Amino acid sequence: MGKQITILLLLLAAFAAKAQQAGNQVNNPRYDERRIVTYGFSLGAHTASLRLKYSDYFTTPAMDSVHSIEPLKKPGFSLGFIVNFRLADFFDARITPKVTFSEYVLKYNYIGTPPATETIESVGVDFPLLLKYKSQRRDNARMYVIGGITPSIEAAGKTNLEEDQKVLQLEGINLMADFGFGFDLYYPLFKFSPEIRFAFGLIDVTGSNNDFTAGIKDLKTKTVSIYFHFQ
């Protein structure tokens, strides 16, 4: 995780430095003042995992065969739209509905036998509601911080089929807290904004009750994303 964040930071710094090299040529000097509402689209890549809390049952003799349950990180991507509202000189509100493709994996480490994994493929429809605070623009770049909440609906959702009751499932509704930062880089025809964002689930999404969840008290999602916004 640390290496990934370092690489993302270097990418953002490189984008910002390139924008500053434009010298005296200022692109779209009144871009942010022209309209109250602007639109765009977004491409994202992320790593997703689960935050796990053991239940008291995990410490009982019935769970002696399980050494640990380990969440694994898996890559994914998202596609979305941007509706941005200018509230003041340095504040924006934005809605960025998107479709997110993720995998969540738990690795069960057993004592005396090989480990096993349970994988959940997720297609989520997310509705981030975000507040953006921007710095003063310098030439063709400005930095910003962003945060808010993201309700999410699982497109597939858990099922009540008998065979699905024997595997790990997640609930069909989630709520996440988002925060991050990025750069607005101004070009002659558009604004490009690379952004790093962290999302932490606020509610338990455990959706099945079987051997795979016997030692688990709750599961919450965790995502680290890099977005490329075009407006």
Image (cartoon, rainbow, N blue to C red):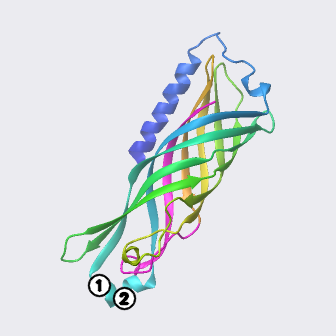
**Residue named by callout 1:** 64
In the image, 150 versus 153, the foreground residue is 153
In-image side of 183 versus 160 (left or right): right
Residue at image location 52% in from the left, 26% down from the top: 15
**Residue named by callout 2:** 60
Which residues are drawn in magenta? 203-231
The relative height of residue 230 versus residue 107 in the rendered view (above or below) is above
Under mark 1, the amino acid is Asp
Q: Is residue 216 magenta?
A: yes
Alpha carbons under labels 1 and 2: distance apart: 7 Å
In-image side of 78 versus 213 (left or right): right
The relative height of residue 208 versus residue 190 in the rendered view (above or below) is below
In-image side of 57 versus 186 (left or right): left
In-image side of 43 versus 175 (left or right): left
Residue at image location 74% in from the left, 27% down from the top: 32
Q: Give residue 231's position: percent from left, percent from top.
A: 64, 30
Instruction: For the residues labelled 1 and 2, say whether their Cβ atoms are less than 8 Å apart.
Output: no
Q: Give residue 214's position: percent from left, percent from top.
A: 40, 81
